Image (cartoon, rainbow, N blue to C red):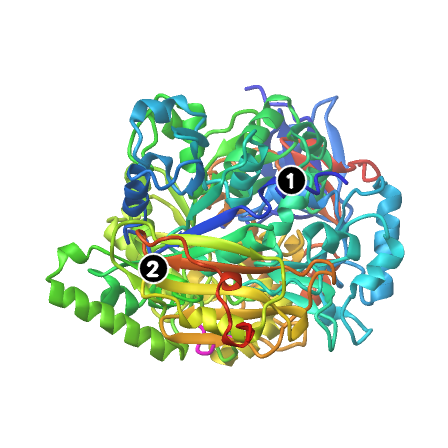
Amino acid sequence: MSNASAVARLRGVPVTVVGGYLGSGKTTLINGWLQQGACEGWALLVNDLGQINVDAERLRQGDGRVLELGGGCVCCTLRDGLGVALLELAKREQPPVHVLIETSGMAVPRRVASQLQLLGLTIARVLQVVDLERIETLWHDPWVGEVVQQQFEGVDVLQFSKADLLEPVEAKRRQQWLLQQLEALQQQPAPPSHSERQLVRSDVWLQLEALERSQVLAWAEQLGPEVLRAKGDLWLADAPHGPVSLDVTGPRVSLAAAPSRPWPSPLQRRGQLVVISRANAAAPRWPATVSSPRLIPA
Amino acid sequence: MTVAVADLIIHGGSILTMEESQPRAEAIAIAGGEILAVGAKADVMAHAGPNTQRLDLAGRSLLPGFIDAHGHFANALQVVGWANIQRPPAGPVTSIADLLQVLREHVVRHPVANGEWVIAYGYDPDGFSDGRPLDKADLDALFPENPVMVIHNSNHGAVLNSCALALAGYDASTPDPAGGVIVRRPGSTEPAGLVMETAFIPLFLHMPQPSEEQRLEQFETAQRLYTAKGITTVQDGATVAADLGLFQRAAREGRLCVDLVLLPLVLDVPSMLRERFPDFHGQPLELPQPAREAFGSYRDRLKLQGIKLLVDGSPQGKTAFWGEPLLTPGPNGEANWRGQPVCAPEQLMEAVAQLSAQGIQLFSHCNGDAAIDLMIEACRRAGLRPEQDHRTVIIHSQFMAPGQLEQYVELGLHPSFFTVHAFFYGDVHLANLGPERAGRMSPMASAMALGLHCSNHNDFSVTPIEPMRMVETAMTRRTRTGVVLGASECVSAEAALRALTIEAAWQIREETSKGSLAPGKRADLVILDADPTALAPDQLNGIAVVATLKDGVCVYGSLDGGQA
């Protein structure tokens, strides 16, 4: 088959999508993460290579499309489109351990994530960077207000920026205001929020054996406050025909009653869970290691 | 005094000059690729010499070669290798059986090895008599071993066969992506074949990319699509970085038989510059002196004209940006949907200010009235005034709000309209916008009354290359079902023809050399088998091109058979 597997080498590679309106502070955050060494071995797909923390000379020496940042980290421009950038990554000798995408200021980040998912990559987290200074104005902007509101669709975590430019009380008020707007707009709890500059932690777990529904619920119950969000498609013993979706945001646990679609084939049953927690949190425990009360031996 | 001797003298039919002082002539003489004389037969015949070829139109008509005011030549390179499965009049398909027959014939002309893609364009199930859409099984029967992509006429989706679905990895277990849909068979999650929007975009990663040599080979056939319709100046109205080099190479190798006008896409300008001026470090849209100077003149028939800006999407796809909500839900079922801009207002303001200050002509795609407002605001802030003669063109200017044309006049903006929308999408616009707003589409009569230079375009490959349908729809504004959208905006045949010739020439700063028949202008000519000003509008699209001349040379059809 011609080039059926053009990006097959990126299958399963976790992806972080960083969304946010123009000027919201996406690049500043990404540069901070780079400095902290949070992106070793990653591929960064950004709109403008010139905005990434590298000296102009190194930028000049690159081929204009891909830039080696050291530490196994590579940076690639999205100017020629997401597809071209992914093909570029797939061609490399060593596929990246993680792909980070900075979306354009007008993009809906969940839609970008969806396309990557269709290409076989695994979505580790979708962050929406919110400029606290401008969010209220942008929300009501006659030209881009609707886009700005739509960008919050399907976001895992809100990442607040520029809070330091405001009085703490005012920053708090605006966060609350936004959460209220989002709940009114989407008729569901707003995504958890994060104000620290560190990159939130994201761990992905592949589930190879069926779990009891009660095991999953017990696991979700015991998650600590360091966990911002847990999401996934699980293999439950009571639903052998397809994955069951789980979404945990703070105290709210939502586990679907039944699968919405089948497994690719009966032999390809495999659940997947993503846990997003604060940067300094320890690795999460996974449901299999948490005993369900019902399973405690008599 | 010696009189210049003509290579060719044409007479004996309607010669429509597009010159207001002398709209009709009896004869025209050309020499050395230019027009030598045009006017009364006796005067023109003074240029006849012993070797002058004479052509009697025998009642046919002659006009200046048409100028493609906006379209995408890069798409022509693509579609010449694809099967045309559009509904009439753009194609032959009215049923699934027709569609399959076109595909059968296509692979006879373009044989495919096992595993190679078969691509068709223009899928529109509304035009089917079957009462059901195309299913993957229809295609599987014909192509069990080849991936097939039948592209939807919106260009935002396609029907895939099982082989293509497997390549993309779409099956019953694949959830619909946000902002897209994998259409399922009734009562199951099994894909039916049609995938749209964000489910369609990733497919391009699975498609083989033709090599530069393969694309160069398509230039001849692609240009014939235009010359066969009398077009002698073609536009690539959103040139991407990857194509600029291709066009330059084709021009260098002498592959262009018509003039090709490029509008580099603003998003791609930085990569174009980086590739050609690696040592230049300016502001993001700052062009080095040689790049600025590269605009505005032909080299081997290729000209960089200006820079293309994109403000919104398409009205039929509901991705245009309007001031008020549509009467129908958005593309993903949104209530109170009025579309969105595709660029951030800050970026647009910056681009307009930066580029216009460097003397670069701007061509801005705006379909909805809110997008038009945004562009007007950007031009206002950039300080554009008509006396600067900047000739900023607002491509489509499709759904204009009252008062916007007056602002065009104030700032020196000029519209390139898209009147064939009335026919192809007018009924859709009526449903989405209601009669009043739909009736304001492409307001050509109002714009002309205000003295604006109005061109008209097909936006190929969005609609087929049909200059005469442009004339017809500018005159009638009639939808497929016969509703007239905004009767007060209908114009005369003469005005409609000027939009394809002299006004289109003005918009690309070529009104002194093209667009009308006058001495010294280039001999870019089209001979039609009837006079478009003498027929009823509904007869116009039946007019055939007899011959097309570029710089005096016949590039389509023949000058034989009418020898005087």
Q: Nearer the viewer, residue B31 or A56?
A: A56
**Position of residue A44 in the picture relative to residue B105 (left or right):** left
* Element assignment for label 1: loop
The span from disc 1 to disc 2 (Cα, nearest Å) is 40 Å
Provide the residue designation for mark 1. Answer: A6
Write down the region rendered in magenta.
B332-338
Is residue B440 something that shows in the picture?
no
Is residue B184 something that shows in the picture?
yes
Q: Residues within 10 Å of mark 2 (few under 14, many from 20)?
A: some
Q: Is residue B11 above or below residue A216?
A: above
Q: Quadrant of the C terminus of chain A?
A: bottom right
Give the quarter of the image for residue B27.
top right
Provide the residue designation for mark 2. Answer: B374
Q: Nearer the viewer, residue A96 or B35?
A: A96
Q: Nearer the viewer, residue A257 or A173?
A: A257
Q: Nearer the viewer, residue B515 or B385?
A: B385
Q: Is residue B335 magenta?
A: yes
> What residue lies at 64% left-to-right and 50% top-to-bottom?
B203
Chain that bears disc 1: A
